[in-house]
């Protein structure tokens, strides 16, 4: 393993590209392997046993490359299976839950933090536990938002779209009534909803788990002298189902920034 080894990123599907996008923005020369388990997406509605099984097979795959770090770019996977991944692999493991929790714990002024995420993430109480590590006085209100992932995947994330705005209000108005001053977007798809949420609730601190995760990764790689020294980059994307469909949706998540080929692999 060297500085120029790959950063190994995985997610249940397309959503982890919001993390990759942030990684590329701050570290454009990093070599990246991405695996999206599109054959099994969504993870957020599944049981912990099933999510763990999928995650272990995802990591086994990305570990077939020369990787210098594992990035769990999926809140559900990170919430449920992170400990297992750390136990099994002798590599630095980065997630999304801890960095976002730390940031939320630091920026809240009234110690009332809202977290929106998949059913599985909220049920795991991962955010509650992680925020408590950094701010023991914080009160955390978790809201499962199962309709948001399918709406985003169907392109319904534009300002003025009455469907997505109605659904967001239904989930978030009760949180606002509790007086939260900080809101964690605890799901990889939600950064695409940032503009709408900011428009609806302008006085709230909004923390994107994807953005903060990339910042934390960069800081850690710098501290450990592991930043890539190459001028160019190599990015490879793998999916467990249709590569074409992934490429089409990737444009929505990343514009034209993929910078690498997408290949379908069979992990079974
Ligand atoms: N990537 C998942 C997450 O961040 C959302 C999609 C899914 O449910 O698999 O929780």
Image (tube, rainbow, N blue to C red):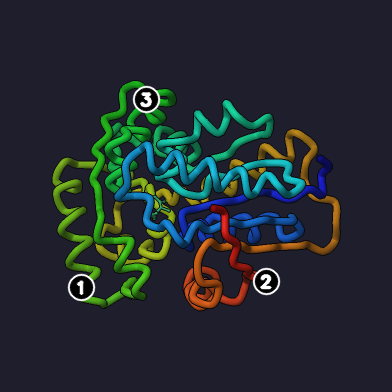
- In the image, which is nearer the foreground, mark 3 or mark 1? 1
When the figure is inspected, residue 55 is found, relative to residue 24, above or below; the finding is above
| Quadrant in the picture for the N terminus | top right
Q: Secondary structure at mark 3?
A: helix
Q: Dividing the picture into quarters, in which one does residue 94 lie?
A: top right
Residue sitting at 69 percent across and 56 percent down?
32
Q: Residues within 10 Å of mark 2 (few under 14, many from 20)?
A: few
Q: Quadrant of residue 159?
A: bottom left
Image location (x, y in percent) of residue 86: 57, 30
The mark nearer the N terminus, 3 or 1, is 3
The CB of the residue at mark 2 lies under 8 Å from ligand 1: no
Question: Residue beneath label 3, please?
Answer: 132
The answer to which of marks 2 and 1 sits earlier in the sequence is: 1
The residue pinned by badge 1 equals 163
Q: Residue at x 50, y 66 (%)?
A: 241
Please give the residue where the numbered disc 2 appears in the rendered image. Answer: 261
Query: Residue 170 vs residue 66: left or right?
Result: left
């Amino acid at each position: 393993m060297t500085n120029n080894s790959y950063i190994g990123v995985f997610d249940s599907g397309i959503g982890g590209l919001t993390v990759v996008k942030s990684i590329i923005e701050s570290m454009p020369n990093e070599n990246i392997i991405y695996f999206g388990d599109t054959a099994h997406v969504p993870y957020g509605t599944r049981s912990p046993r099933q999510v763990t099984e999928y995650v272990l097979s995802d990591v086994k795959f990305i570990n077939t490359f020369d990787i210098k770090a594992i990035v769990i770019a999926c809140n559900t996977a990170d919430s449920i299976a992170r400990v297992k991944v750390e136990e099994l692999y002798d590599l630095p493991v980065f997630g999304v839950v801890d960095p976002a929790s730390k940031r939320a714990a630091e920026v809240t002024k009234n110690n009332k933090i809202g977290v929106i995420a998949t059913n599985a993430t909220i049920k795991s109480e991962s955010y509650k536990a992680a925020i408590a590590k950094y701010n023991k006085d914080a009160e955390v209100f978790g809201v499962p938002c199962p309709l948001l992932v399918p709406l985003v995947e169907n392109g319904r994330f534009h300002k003025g779209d009455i469907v997505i705005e109605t659904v967001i209000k239904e989930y978030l108005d009760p949180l606002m009534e509790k007086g939260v001053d900080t809101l964690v977007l605890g799901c990889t798809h939600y950064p695409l909803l940032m503009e709408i949420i900011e428009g609806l609730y302008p006085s709230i601190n909004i923390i994107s788990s994807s953005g903060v995760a990339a910042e934390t990764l960069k800081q850690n790689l710098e501290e450990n002298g592991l930043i890539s020294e190459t001028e160019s980059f190599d990015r490879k994307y793998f999916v467990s189902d249709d590569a074409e469909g992934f490429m089409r949706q990737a444009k929505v998540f990343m514009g034209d920034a993929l910078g690498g080929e997408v290949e379908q692999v069979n992990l079974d």
